[in-house]
Each structure stands twice: as C-alpha cells, then as structure tokens.
C-alpha cells in the first residue's frame, strides 16, 4: 500500500531541479553517538568544530534529518540499504538485543543490495573505513557487501573481551577479512582510519569512488578515546577531545579532496548514526532536542547532517524539510547514474531538497516517517507533526523496560524541544497520523505483528570469534 505512492513521489521529486552534473565521488562520514548539540554550526559552544562548520557554510545544513533507529546496528543498516531496519529484520539481534554483539549469528543479509554494491556496479571504487556493525561473520563483512576495501573494527569499540571473557574475542582490527591486530588500541582508531581514508582518496583520485567512513567515536564508553594529539586539549573533557579529533578527521578528508582537485567533483555527507547517549559529564548534547540516544526521541534520531557538493548544491543554505538516512541510497544512486535496487526500499530520491531553493517539499509528508525502537513502532512524523503512539504495555529497550506512555502530539518543526503537547487541540492531525501508523504496521509490522514487506536477516548456524591467526 505504501509503495506505489512512494514511487510516484520519488519520481515527482526527481523532476524538480535534478542537476545534469557529471557523477560525483561520494564521501559519507557517519559519527557514532554524536548529537545535534555537539557541533558548532548546529549550536554547540562546548567544543571546536571548525572543519565541520566550514563544510556547512559551503553546503546545505539539514535540520530535520532523521536516522532510522536510535541505536547503531539498525541505523547503519538503513544508511546502506535505504530500508527501515524492521524491513531487513535487523531491528534486533538473534538473541533479542538492540544491536549485534560479537560472535553474532545474524547479519545484514547478503541478498540485500547496499549502496556500495549499487555504486560499485556503476564503476565506483568503494571503501568502508571505521566501524561496520552489520555482522561479524565472514558472510556479513563489508567485503561481501560491495566494499573493495575494509579497514576497521567489526562492531562497537566497547564490546571488549573483558565484558564476556568466555565468548567474545579481543577487539579485532581488520583489513579486508583478516584480523591484523587484537586487541586494537582504541586511542588511535580515528587517526588511523583517517589516514586510511586519505590514502584511499589519493589512490582513487582518477576514477569515481565511494568512501564510507562510519566512525568508532565518540562511541559508547564512559570516556571516549582520542589520540595523544587531542587528549586534554578541548574545554569539554574526553568527550570534547573526541569530537575535536573527529572534526580534525573531517578537515583531513576535505583537504585530501582539495589536494587532488576533487572538491567540485565530490559530494560529501557528514552526519551521525544516532544521538548522544547519557554519560557522566562532560557529555554530549542533543540540544535543542529532547532525550538521549537509543530511543525514538528527537534527540536520539534527529541529527546534524551536512551535504556539500560545490557547484551543484548551493552554499550556506538551511533545509528544514524532513529527510532521512533512508534517502541516501536512492538519492546518491540517481546522482551516480546508477539504479536503485529492484526490491522495495523505503527511502526517497531527495535531490530536490538539497538543490532547489525553498520550493521543494519532503516526500515523507504523505506516507509519514516511522520511529521504531527495536520492533516497536513508537512514533510517526508527517509535516510538522510527530505523534508518540500510546503504549499500554511496558516496552523492552536497551536500558530495560520503559513505562507505559499516553498518546502525545508535538509540532516538532516549531517546537523542536517538544514542550507543548497538542493532541487535544488537533484531533484531525492525530487521526491522520494514526492512519499512517497503521499503514506502516501492515507493511513493516509492529511488536509481535509481522509486516508483509519484511525480509529475512542474514543468518549462520554457528558463529566464530574474529581472532588473530
Ligand atoms: Ca551509534
């Protein structure tokens, strides 16, 4: 029921101001657990982010950009597939956890078509440099999902052997499918991944490339890691040091593009996989949004995002229309002259939102954007309105069971902090959003109710730890 409308709108949006520029290189930088209020150009004063701020000044700043989940694995799956995690059955692990743990029998199904596969088939060189987190078995590694190059860790940096000595290996660093170090020194991950990214740009400057940099930091540990050059240098503790190193990393990648004369031929996207998570101060910030990472709050899923492509995307704009990490695959595929996967996906071609002044409208306004926490549909947004669905049963979450909640409606465009509850004043809006929620349940499911559009996750019978050989 959702699909024909989606296809129609995507086609309609593509006709609006779609540029005829040559296909760009694509650099996709995704931080880990970094919130909207952590970045200067999005309002932070806690730490310095000059390189990211410059990117925003030279591109479009998206202020209603949503990821598809408040936690790592499902959010990262959506970036690469354009699908809601529940469609892929990656909304939870095989053991019912919110993310994949080491030695997981589940992973992103090799049958799914990733952005890397779409672009590689169109002639792009492809690299994934950072934290994967879509399956740690050989069948599920980046090299099996369209990436020529993988350098990084297979899951979160806090999934260390000391937490599960009987089952988990030392944190492995991989090149391709081979463990080259274990345990890897986490202080140097961002620096080393940046050096690998810069090298990949240099080696592929003469052909189209897709560089995916899913960072490991600030991550989930109480004190984020950073290299000695940044440690103790920010005004905001270990957290600020980590964010400033990520900003440095962005600057190095942008400088490498400049050095090779690729600035005008490269589309850079900069964002995060979910909002800042609660730690002991000094900690991250999701301001002006409410809530912390891991749930379906605005703070968890509405993230800073910048898209820069000089000459095609006008500089210095702010776009407040709703768009999503789900949109990257169909949007980037079109810009690369490639076709999106033949199977149903959830994202839209939103090129017009990035390039056209003021006139383009979000394709999500019609079908609505869904907020799932694991398998539970908890909220829907369309236009300015976000409804939190009433829940009579306690819901299972990363931090244990959350209490029952009533239906709540907010105008998150004009009240981003969700301070004024409006359901009693806007019954027609509520009815409309509840209809969209029901449409989503039919297609994607909700709780124990299956959706007709769900597809199986990848699975292996026996998982082995990734160890040095
Ligand atoms: Ca994350």
Image (cartoon, helix red, strand yellow):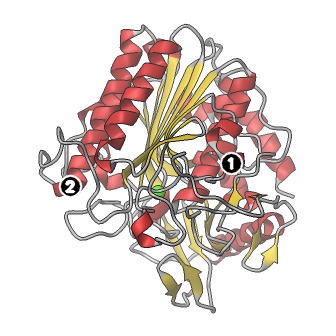
Residue 363 can be seen in this image: no
Quarter occupied by the C terminus: top right
User: Callout 2: helix, strand or loop?
Assistant: helix
Q: Position of residue 404 (x, y in %)?
A: 55, 90
Q: Nearer the viewer, mark 1 or mark 2?
A: 1
Quarter occupied by the N terminus: bottom right
- Compared with residue 33, is residue 21 higher up or lower down, i.e. above or below? above
The image's mark for residue 238 is 2
Taking the spot 64% from the left edge, 58% from the top edge, the residue there is 464
Marks 1 and 2, how far apart at CA: 33 Å
Residue that sits furthest to the front in the current view: 469
In-front residue for pair 157/38: 157
Please identify the quarter of the rendering in which residue 255 is found. Answer: top left
Taking the spot 31% from the left edge, 28% from the top edge, the residue there is 251
Q: Residues within 10 Å of mark 2 (few under 14, many from 20)?
A: many
Q: Position of residue 450 (x, y in %)?
A: 82, 72
In the picture, measured across the screen, residue 352 lies left or right of residue 268, that is: right
């Amino acid at each position: 029921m959702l699909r024909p409308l989606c296809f129609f709108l995507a086609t309609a949006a593509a006709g609006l101001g779609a540029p005829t520029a040559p296909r760009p290189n694509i650099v996709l930088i995704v931080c880990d657990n970094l919130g909207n209020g952590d970045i200067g150009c999005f309002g932070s004063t806690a730490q310095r982010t000059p390189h990211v701020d410059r990117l925003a000044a030279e591109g479009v700043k998206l202020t209603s950009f949503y990821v598809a989940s408040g936690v790592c694995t499902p959010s990262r799956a959506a970036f690469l597939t354009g699908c809601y995690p529940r469609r892929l059955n990656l909304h939870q692990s095989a053991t019912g956890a919110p993310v994949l743990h080491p030695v997981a029998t589940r992973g992103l199904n090799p049958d799914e078509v990733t952005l890397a596969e779409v672009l590689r088939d169109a002639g792009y060189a492809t690299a994934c440099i950072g934290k994967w987190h879509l399956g740690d078995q050989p069948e599920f590694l980046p090299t099996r999902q369209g990436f020529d190059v993988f350098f990084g860790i297979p899951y979160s940096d806090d999934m260390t052997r000391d937490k599960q000595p009987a089952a988990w290996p030392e944190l492995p660093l991989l090149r391709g499918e081979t463990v080259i170090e274990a345990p890897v020194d986490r202080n140097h991950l961002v620096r080393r991944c940046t050096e690998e990214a810069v090298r990949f740009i240099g080696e592929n400057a003469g052909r189209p490339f897709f560089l995916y940099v899913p960072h490991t930091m600030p991550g989930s540990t109480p004190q984020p890691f950073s290299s000695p050059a940044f440690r103790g240098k920010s005004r905001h503790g270990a957290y600020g040091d980590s964010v400033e190193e990520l900003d440095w990393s962005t600057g190095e990648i942008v400088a490498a593009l400049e050095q090779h004369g690729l600035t005008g031929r490269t589309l850079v996207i900069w964002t995060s996989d979910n909002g800042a998570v609660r730690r002991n101060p000094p900690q991250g910030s999701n301001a002006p949004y409410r809530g912390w990472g891991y749930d379906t709050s605005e703070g968890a899923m509405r993230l800073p995002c910048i898209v820069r492509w000089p000459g095609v995307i006008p500089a210095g704009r702010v776009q407040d229309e709703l768009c999503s990490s789900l949109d990257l695959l169909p949007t980037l595929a079109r810009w690369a002259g490639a076709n999106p996967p033949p199977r149903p996906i959830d994202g839209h071609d939103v090129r017009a939102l990035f390039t056209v002044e003021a006139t383009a409208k979000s394709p999500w306004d019609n079908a609505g954007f869904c907020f799932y926490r694991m398998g539970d549909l908890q909220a829907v947004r369309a236009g300015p309105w976000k409804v939190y669905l009433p829940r009579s049963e306690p819901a299972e979450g990363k931090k244990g069971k959350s209490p029952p909640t009533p239906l709540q409606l907010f105008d998150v465009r004009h009240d981003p902090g969700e301070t004024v509850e409006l359901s009693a004043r806007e019954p027609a809006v509520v009815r409309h959003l509840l209809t969209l929620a029901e449409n989503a349940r039919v297609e994607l499911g909700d709780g124990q109710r299956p959706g007709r559009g769900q597809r199986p996750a990848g699975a292996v019978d026996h998982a082995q730890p990734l160890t040095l050989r």
